[in-house]
Image (cartoon, rainbow, N blue to C red):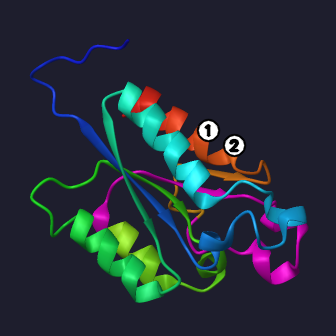
């Protein structure tokens, strides 16, 4: 078991999932797999606890709700999050508002996609987030979330 310096404040990471990701395991499993969002969240929460990290999970189909969540966990919080793992889903290709919220947060984030967005429809290859992210993981299924968390465990 990893021990933490008692004077060190536990880290907080937000796991943010965008539109339709609440349907994982049911929606187009040939593209997105059979693992549910709850399965992913539970797995990452357990791994985070092992490393004394608080993982705060959030999913919304609504752009404004995601913007509000980022603000509430960031600049408007007395104990802001330290990092973000985000799968913006369809908002990847459309949301300047979420991009601006992440920029205002000014914390590292990793962009995750279950499918390879560059091997799909041409409109999916543009991301409003990738140039600001510390990393982008796409096309590796739900293991991309684990890779993002592993990076933060080593680098926060």
User: Quarter holding the C terminus?
Assistant: top left
Q: Residues within 10 Å of mark 2 (few under 14, many from 20)?
A: some
Q: Is residue 7 left or right of residue 97?
A: left
In x, y percent, where is residue 145?
A: 60, 47
Q: Residue 56's image quarter? A: bottom left
Q: Are marks 1 and 2 in contact (CB under 8 Å)?
A: yes
Q: Disc 1 on helix, strand or loop?
A: helix
User: Quarter holding the N terminus?
Assistant: top left
Q: Residue 11's image quarter? A: top left
Identity of the residue drawn at 35% across and 14% down: 2
Q: Residue 54's image quarter? A: top left
Q: Residues within 10 Å of mark 1 (few under 14, many from 20)?
A: some
Which of these two is toward me, 110 or 103? Answer: 110
Identity of the residue drawn at 15% across and 70% down: 76
Q: Does residue 57 lie above or below 144 as drawn?
A: below
- Asked if the stretch drawn in magenta spans residue 122, the answer is yes
Inter-mark Cα distance, 1 to 2: 6 Å
Which of these two is toward me, 110 or 26? Answer: 26
The residue where tag 1 is placed is 147
Q: Is residue 132 left or right of residue 26?
A: left
Q: Does residue 55 lie above or below 53 as drawn?
A: below
Q: Disc 2 on helix, strand or loop?
A: helix
The residue where tag 2 is placed is 143
Q: Residue 90: give its label.
A: none
Q: Identify the magenta region.
A: 104-129
Which of these two is toward me, 49 or 119? Answer: 49
Q: Is residue 80 left or right of residue 146?
A: left
């Amino acid at each position: 078991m990893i021990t933490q310096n008692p004077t060190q404040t536990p880290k907080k990471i937000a796991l943010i999932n965008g539109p339709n990701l609440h349907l994982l395991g049911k929606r187009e499993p040939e593209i997105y797999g059979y693992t549910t969002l709850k399965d992913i969240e539970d797995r990452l929460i357990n791994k985070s606890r092992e490393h004394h990290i608080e993982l705060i999970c959030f999913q919304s189909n609504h752009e404004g709700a995601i913007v509000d969540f980022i603000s509430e966990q960031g600049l408007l919080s007395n104990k802001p999050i330290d990092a973000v793992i985000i799968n913006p889903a369809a908002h990847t290709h459309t949301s300047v508002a979420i991009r601006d919220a992440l920029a205002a947060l000014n914390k590292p984030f990793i962009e995750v996609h279950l499918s390879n967005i560059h091997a799909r429809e041409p409109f999916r290859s543009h991301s409003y987030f990738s140039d600001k992210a510390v990393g982008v993981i796409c096309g590796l299924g739900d293991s991309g979330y684990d890779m993002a968390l592993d990076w933060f465990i080593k680098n926060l």
